[in-house]
Image (cartoon, rainbow, N blue to C red):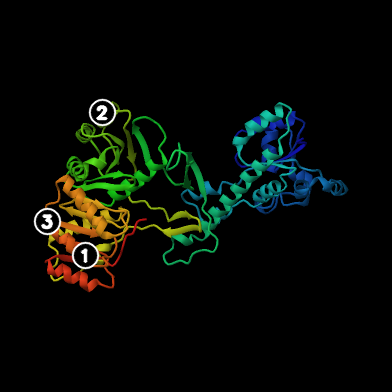
């Protein structure tokens, strides 16, 4: 039975409903000075911590609850009650605490190092940890969202179970772990510093954004989490409000990351997290036409992304041609939205901002542990390109090589991209060798009737043998871009020279696994 509760909250939401329930159930209230004054102002009796400890708050409020009378009352086990009586300390059965809003303070403009330091809670964290540690006897509540169900139990004359206290204790420790991780990252943003060493201990302070319908497959559970303050980049402007799925988010990430890499109007069609067709053009309708033509089979049911606003002409061109899952753009005209509303199965999402916003790192779970790496951010790569064959690329080849190289970064390795005049002609990826990827790209180009040269070829990794160059020559490829760095680079260069090809080495690869 809960006979005494300690309350210390900065977020007082729901407290004026919860506290009277505690009192009516026979619980006496003890609260920090600010919280007790708030309760008394609303007619709820509460003893002040300062009155109990006979120690006023100190150092401008930095020291409020760090006192044996409180921690003894919280940490006492059932067998310690005689010791408490001898010391004149009453046991505390319920601890209701939420912390200084340090996460919110981080997001406010004008904050200084000194002002943020004062938003780091010390006593609240200690109270939470003490109560959670002693959950066998003590109930800890850190979330106002738990007030209603606890109040319902008490009003029904029911006690909280051991399982209830354990669940609340685990929630409390998750809160303090998250809080401390935010503070550590703010004090030393080690992973956002170039050339920084990796910390021995690594924590991600993530907040659940939404529970997804399921994971990659229906039998897998999944949820979306965000970093503190991480903004939503998608807004539903038309279509049914069915929550986005795990696979939807993967496709959205792939499509928007790719299309945002281009300065000219561009369209990217994605299926199973990889691009099936990519094109640039003078307008979005033509960019879509070229992307669709590159692989019309894979485009069915795909995710289509643009880097320019869409009007009615663009929307009608797409809807009259194919079924799509998601349509992404930085904006839609009102007329386009009205047209889309007649197709409720198609979800149109505004992506804002449509820029390559990369998280600081990527995390992947393995049986061996967790792999963490920096994201493959766009670089000023063209400055490091080297023409290594006898014939340099023409201006048109240079433009197409850069285009194909950008696309290759978003294709699963081994990646081969055939392109011409700002359009992918064939994309091959996810194969164990580059010859197979080239064969796949070639077959797609032939199926689409886009295998006529001249073509350029991009490879996300170096070409270990001259075989890809030799086979590419039979397809009408006149220029190749690849990282270079293989033991047989000279043989690859000689093969390019033999066929009169231009060959550019980037010195940087873009594997995607």
Label annotation for residue 339: 2
Of tags 2 and 3, the one toward the viewer is 3
Q: Which residue is mark 3?
A: 454
Task: Specify which label sits upstream in the sequence, 2 or 3.
Answer: 2
On screen, residue 105 above or below 470: above
Residue sitting nearer the eye, 199 or 466: 466
Give the spatial CA distance, label 3 vs label 1: 19 Å
Q: Is residue 261 above or below residue 391?
A: above
Disc 1 secondary structure class: helix
Residue 27, x across and y down, in percent: 76, 34
Residue at the spot x=55%, y=49% of the render?
102
Q: Is residue 178 left or right of residue 458?
A: right
Give the numbered dot on residue 467: 1
Q: Nearer the viewer, mark 2 or mark 1?
A: 1
Left or right position of 52 against 399:
right
Q: In the image, what residue occupies the spot 59% across and 35% down? A: 145
User: How packed is label 1: few (under 14 Cα within 10 Å), some, or many (20 or more)?
Assistant: some
**Mark 2 residue element:** helix
For the residues labelled 2 and 3, the Cα–Cα distance comes to: 39 Å
Along the viewing direction, whichever of 484 and 190 lies nearer the viewer: 484
Label located before the other in sequence (2 or 1)? 2
For the question of whether residue 431 can be seen, the reply is yes
Count of residue discs: 3
Left or right: 217 in relation to 153? left
Q: CA distance from mark 2 to mark 1?
A: 50 Å
* Foreground: disc 3 or disc 1: 1
Q: Is residue 20 visible?
A: no
């Amino acid at each position: 039975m809960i006979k005494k509760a300690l309350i210390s909250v900065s977020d007082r939401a729901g407290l004026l409903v919860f506290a009277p329930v505690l009192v009516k159930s026979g619980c006496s209230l003890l609260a920090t000075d600010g919280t007790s004054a708030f309760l008394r102002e609303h007619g709820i009796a509460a003893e002040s911590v300062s009155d109990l400890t006979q120690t006023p708050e100190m150092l401008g409020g930095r020291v409020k609850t760090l006192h044996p009378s409180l921690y003894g009352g919280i940490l006492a086990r059932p067998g310690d009650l005689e010791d408490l009586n001898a010391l004149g300390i009453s046991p505390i059965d319920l601890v209701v605490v939420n912390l200084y809003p340090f996460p919110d303070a981080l997001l406010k403009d004008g904050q200084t190092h000194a002002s943020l330091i004062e938003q780091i809670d010390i006593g609240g964290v200690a109270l939470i940890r003490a109560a959670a540690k002693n959950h066998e006897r003590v109930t800890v509540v850190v979330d106002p969202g738990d007030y209603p169900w606890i109040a319902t139990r008490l009003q029904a004359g029911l006690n909280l179970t051991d399982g209830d206290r354990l669940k609340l204790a685990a929630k409390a420790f998750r809160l303090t772990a998250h809080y401390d991780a935010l503070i550590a990252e703010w004090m030393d943003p080690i992973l956002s510093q170039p050339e920084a060493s990796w910390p021995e201990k690594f924590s991600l302070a993530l907040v659940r954004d939404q529970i997804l319908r399921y994971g990659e497959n229906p039998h897998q559970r999944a949820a979306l989490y965000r970093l503190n303050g991480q903004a939503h980049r998608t807004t539903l402007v038309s279509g049914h409000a069915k929550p986005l799925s795990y696979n939807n988010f993967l496709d959205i990430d792939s499509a928007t990351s790719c299309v945002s890499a281009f300065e000219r109007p561009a369209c990217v069609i994605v299926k199973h997290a990889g691009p099936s067709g990519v094109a640039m053009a003078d307008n979005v309708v033509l960019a879509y036409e070229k992307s669709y033509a590159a692989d019309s089979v894979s485009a069915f049911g795909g995710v289509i992304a643009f880097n320019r606003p869409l009007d009615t002409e663009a929307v009608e061109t797409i809807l009259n041609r194919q079924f799509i899952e998601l349509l992404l753009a930085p904006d839609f005209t009102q007329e386009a939205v009205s047209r889309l509303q007649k197709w409720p199965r198609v979800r149109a999402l505004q992506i804002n901002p449509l820029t390559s916003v990369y998280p600081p790192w990527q995390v992947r779970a393995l049986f061996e542990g967790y792999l963490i790496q920096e994201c493959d951010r766009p670089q000023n790569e063209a400055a490091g390109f080297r023409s290594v064959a006898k014939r340099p690329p023409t201006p048109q080849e240079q433009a197409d090589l850069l285009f194909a190289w950008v696309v290759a970064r978003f294709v699963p390795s081994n990646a081969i991209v055939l392109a011409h005049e700002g359009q992918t002609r064939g994309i091959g990826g996810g194969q164990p060798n580059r010859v197979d990827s080239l064969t796949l790209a070639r077959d797609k180009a032939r199926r689409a009737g886009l295998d006529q040269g001249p073509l350029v070829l991009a490879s996300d990794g170096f070409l270990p043998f001259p075989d890809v160059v030799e086979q590419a020559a039979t397809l009408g490829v006149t220029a190749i871009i690849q990282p270079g760095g293989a033991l047989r680079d000279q043989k690859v260069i000689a093969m390019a020279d033999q066929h009169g090809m231009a060959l550019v080495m980037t010195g940087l690869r873009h594997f995607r696994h």
